[in-house]
Structures are given as structure tokens and as C-alpha cells.
């Protein structure tokens, strides 16, 4: 895929109580935002295990958006503070893997802030478009000679001289 | 295996240190019981055995294969495939085979960088390597072509290479657990295929230290603090991985004031050990201020991959660092 036709694939984890409602509001108010985000509704942004992010990247996502209630407004009292701390830990860890921390975005969007969510999605899409595709599983590709080398071993063993009894 | 006939046992090592073999011998005189129950047809560390004899076996003729080590070269991949084909039960034995372990940490580099370290800067070519010679897959000689195994950019786990029946965790697995696993094989009391042979709980459950509520304001490296011998190490701010690590070791390290580093890997149902640690630690950091949180984390955990993926990088969801390579040796 050439650079100018690259459409980022973004997975968005939206909390049920604020941000998913915000996206509903954005929809009913016909706000326009980038179509690159695939939304998954979770009960709380605190439900978003870091392995969800890593799995999304390993399966081909270019970026992940996490959206939840504003700090202090969590439906489950203080779970979004856990999200805040996990986000900080993830941002600290990803660069070591060679992944730009900008590929994970955390946004607080209340049920009334459809526009804020739409803007965040637009911003993230633009940023990721700039960063380019992640294409993570390509990192696991091996040198093309791997399979040949495996066959070589079997061939060598076949051709090797039998030791006479 | 039939009742009056001995079974066949193969033990193999790939990218590993040999510790798994040592601890297998650590079952002491019970090794004689193993030899009484099995013909040991291959065990490079302890007995003689020829690859070509294995090649001549019919499929599934080996009753039990204990495979330790990760897959780093084409030769190791060949052996993994061969032993899979010839074995009824293939056990990923020890952390390397299960999740890459310390050799898997080299997935933070690629082949080029590893070769630079070894053949340019390292001691392998002491005193020097002026012509910058590197191992080649093929070398033409007057007598014919010589082959060396292809060295991979990415170390793979055994299960990323072939189908695995059982997993025995630990770096290395403790002799008691090895004996338990062998007994289960001999008595036919193995859990369902695909299982990890070991308890499904965490090191904390085996740790005798007192636990109360965890609230961490600052992480300490082990040399920065003299820990209280009776209180949970994590509560004292020492990065102890016991909270995310499978039990089975008897909490050996925390009992001698040394934090758990996670060699038994994750419990059932956890896809990514490091993510589990990140998640668990995020819950116990005692701050609700983003700047303070960032400071606690960046000052206290300078090497997150080394801390959270020391044993599990190759088996993790991301498997390695982003690969920059032109695929030239």
C-alpha cells in the first residue's frame, strides 16, 4: 500500500457510561469525524487490560484510542485512575519496543462531549497517517532462506555416508 | 507404551543454557527409575544419541520428548520438527521452550546487531577480527559446499514452531516439579493436552511474607533499599513479579529478600505476562496526579521490557522489538 492511500486502522475502547454515549451524541448530532476508528464498547476504561492494546497491535492495528469518563466522574468511583496509571506505564514501555507512544491515545470525554471525542479521533487519525502503518506481524518474518536451510539439513543427512557396521 | 516394554525418552536442548538438563539430573537417584522405565534414546547433555537414528524411527515412536530451549537457528527448528514428528508427547520444558526466556531477550536486537556484538565488539573473536568475518550459511570450499545453520533475527518459542502437548514452567524447572511431571507421565495422570503442568496460582500464595494493602509511592531497585525480611517486598516498593507469576517454586527468591523475577511465567488464561504486570502495578501505585504517576514510573522502572518481559519476551503478544534489517548477514 503506498503512503498516500494509507488509511490508519484504529481500535477505540470506549467506556459505556461516558465516551460511548459521547460517540452516540456525535452520531445523532451528525458531527463528522474520521472513519478510521473501530469502536469497542467496554463497561469502564479501567476494563481495558494492556494486553488488549498489545493484541490489537499484533493483529494489525495502527493505533489504539482509549476513552473514558473524566477523572473524578467514573461510574465505578476511581477505576479510570487505574486507566491513567496503566496509560502512563504503557507510554513508558512502548518506545522500548520501537512503537511510537503517540499510537496510544487516552481521552476523557463525558456523555455531553461528542465534539471532544470526534476531535480526538480526527487528531489521532491525522497523527497516525503521518506516522505511517505499523504492520507489526511483519517484524516476525524471517529471512527467506529459512525454509531452504531446513531442507538443506535433511538433504545433507540423506547424502551423508552410512557408517559401516 | 505396553506393560512389559520400556518406553522411549528423548531430551533435547536448543537455545538454552543447559540448566534444564542439570535440574533434570537434579532428581538424583530417581534418574535410575527413569532409566528403568525408559530407553533414553537421545539426551545430548548426558548420553549418546544420533540425529540420524531419530530420523529412522517411525512417527510417534518416541513416547516422551522433553524439549528445552528456544528456536534461534534453522538447525534447532529442524530438530523441533523432527522430534515433534517422532514423539507421542512433546513437552516444552522450561522457560526457554515455553516463552523464550533470557535467550529471547535478544529479540530486542536483530541478527546483525547480535553478530556485531559477538564478532566485532565481543570476546568471541579475541583478540580481533580485522576482516570482519561472520558466520555464513554457505561456504564454498575446494571439497564442496559447507553449511552452517541459518541464524534467525527472532527467537521463536517451541509452540510458535510446532504443536506442543505440555508445558513445564521454570527457569529451570525445579527437580521436584520435574519428578512430579515424570510421575504423571508414568502413571498416566497427565492433565488434558495443552496444559501447563503446575499449580494455577501465583507466587504470592506460596510467599510467607505478610501482606496488607499495597500503596506504592516510589519504586526501589534492589540495591537501593534494605528490605524488611517479613513484609511483602512489593509493599516496600521493590519491583517483585510474584503477583503475576505462576506458583510452583515455593517462593524461593522472596524468601531470601530477592524479588520474584517471573521465571515461571503467567498463569492460565493470561496472554501476555508483561501486560499482566503493567496492569497489576498500575493498580497499586498510590497517586491520582498524572505528573506524579509519570515520575514514579519513569524513575522507578528504567527498563520496563527487562522488568516485565525478562522471561517472556519471545512468547509475548509483540514477540520482539521493531525489526530494522536489510536481511543481510
Image (cartoon, coloured by chain):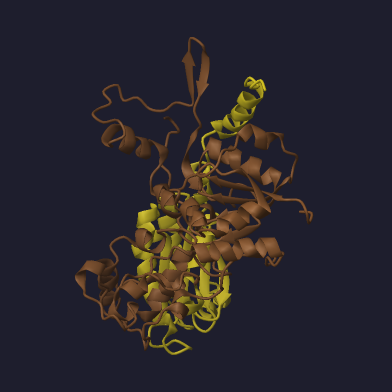
Chain colours: A yellow, B brown
Which part of the image, by quadrant, shows the C terminus of chain B?
top left
* Residue A60 falls in image quadrant: bottom right
- Residue A10 visible at all: no
Q: Residue at x 62, y 55 (%)?
A: B34
User: In the image, is residue B111 above or below residue B213?
Assistant: above
Marks counted in the figure total 0
Between B8 and B137, the residue placed more toward the observer is B8
Which part of the image, by quadrant, shows the N terminus of chain B?
bottom right
Q: Residue at x 46, y 67 (%)?
A: B275
Q: Residue furthest top?
A: B142
User: In the image, is residue A145 above or below residue B92?
Assistant: above
Between A160 and B154, the residue placed more toward the observer is A160
Q: Position of residue B16 (x, y in %)?
A: 46, 48
Q: Position of residue B179 (x, y in %)?
A: 57, 63
Q: Residue at x 33, y 71 (%)?
A: B239
Q: Position of residue A164 (x, y in %)?
A: 66, 20
- Residue B253 visible at all: yes
Q: Position of residue B101 (x, y in %)?
A: 45, 55
Between B80 and A64, the residue placed more toward the observer is B80
A146 left or right, relative to A116: right
A97 left or right, relative to B36: left
Amino acid at each position: 500500500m503506498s503512503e498516500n492511500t494509507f488509511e490508519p486502522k484504529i481500535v477505540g475502547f470506549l467506556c459505556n457510561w461516558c465516551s460511548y454515549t459521547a460517540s452516540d451524541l456525535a452520531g445523532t448530532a451528525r458531527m463528522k469525524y474520521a472513519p478510521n476508528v473501530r469502536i469497542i464498547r467496554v463497561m469502564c476504561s479501567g476494563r481495558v487490560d494492556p494486553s488488549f492494546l498489545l493484541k490489537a497491535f499484533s493483529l494489525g492495528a495502527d493505533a489504539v484510542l482509549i476513552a473514558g469518563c473524566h477523572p473524578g466522574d467514573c461510574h465505578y468511583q476511581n477505576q479510570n485512575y487505574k486507566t491513567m496509571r496503566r496509560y502512563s506505564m504503557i507510554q513508558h514501555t512502548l518506545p522500548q519496543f520501537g512503537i511510537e507512544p503517540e499510537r496510544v491515545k487516552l481521552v476523557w470525554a463525558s456523555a455531553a462531549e461528542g465534539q471532544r471525542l470526534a476531535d480526538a479521533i480526527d487528531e489521532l487519525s491525522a497523527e497516525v497517517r503521518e506516522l505511517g502503518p505499523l504492520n507489526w506481524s511483519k517484524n516476525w518474518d524471517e529471512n527467506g532462506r529459512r525454509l531452504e536451510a531446513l531442507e538443506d539439513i535433511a538433504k545433507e543427512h540423506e547424502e551423508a555416508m552410512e557408517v559401516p557396521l | 507404551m505396553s506393560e512389559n516394554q520400556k518406553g522411549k525418552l528423548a531430551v533435547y536442548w536448543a537455545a538454552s543454557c543447559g540448566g534444564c538438563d542439570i535440574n533434570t539430573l537434579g532428581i538424583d537417584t530417581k534418574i535410575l527409575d527413569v532409566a528403568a522405565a525408559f530407553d533414553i534414546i537421545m539426551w545430548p547433555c548426558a548420553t549418546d544419541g544420533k540425529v540420524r537414528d531419530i530420523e529412522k524411527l517411525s512417527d510417534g515412536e518416541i513416547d516422551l520428548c522433553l524439549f528445552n530451549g528456544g528456536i534461534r537457528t534453522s538447525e534447532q527448528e529442524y530438530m523441533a520438527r523432527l522430534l515433534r514428528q517422532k514423539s507421542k508427547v512433546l513437552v516444552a520444558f522450561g522457560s526457554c521452550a515455553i516463552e523464550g526466556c533470557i535467550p529471547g531477550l535478544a529479540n530486542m536486537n536483530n541478527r546483525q546487531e547480535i553478530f556485531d556484538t559477538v564478532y566485532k565488539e565481543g570476546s568471541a573473536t579475541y583478540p580481533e577480527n580485522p576482516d570482519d568475518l561472520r558466520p555464513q550459511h554457505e561456504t564454498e570450499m575446494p571439497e564442496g559446499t559447507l553449511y552452517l545453520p541459518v541464524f534467525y533475527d527472532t527467537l521463536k518459542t517451541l509452540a510458535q514452531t510446532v504443536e506442543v502437548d505440555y508445558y513445564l514452567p521454570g527457569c529451570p524447572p525445579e527437580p521436584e516439579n520435574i519428578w512430579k511431571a515424570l510421575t504423571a507421565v508414568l502413571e498416566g495422570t497427565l492433565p488434558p493436552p495443552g496444559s501447563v503442568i503446575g499449580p494455577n496460582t501465583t507466587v504470592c500464595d506460596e510467599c510467607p511474607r505478610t501482606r496488607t494493602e499495597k500503596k506504592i509511592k516510589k519504586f526501589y531497585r534492589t540495591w537501593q533499599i534494605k528490605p524488611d525480611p517479613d513484609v511483602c517486598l512489593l509493599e516496600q516498593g521493590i519491583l517483585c513479579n510474584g503477583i503475576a507469576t505462576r506458583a510452583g517454586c515455593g517462593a524461593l527468591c522472596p524468601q531470601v529478600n530477592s524479588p520474584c523475577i517471573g521465571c515461571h511465567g503467567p498463569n492460565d488464561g493470561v496472554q501476555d505476562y508483561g501486560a499482566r504486570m503493567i496492569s497489576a502495578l498500575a493498580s497499586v501505585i498510590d497517586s491520582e496526579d498524572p505528573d506524579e504517576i509519570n515520575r514514579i514510573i519513569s524513575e522507578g522502572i528504567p527498563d520496563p521490557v527487562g522488568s516485565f518481559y525478562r522471561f517472556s519476551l519471545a512468547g509475548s503478544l509483540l514477540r520482539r522489538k521493531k525489526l530494522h534489517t536489510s536481511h543481510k548477514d
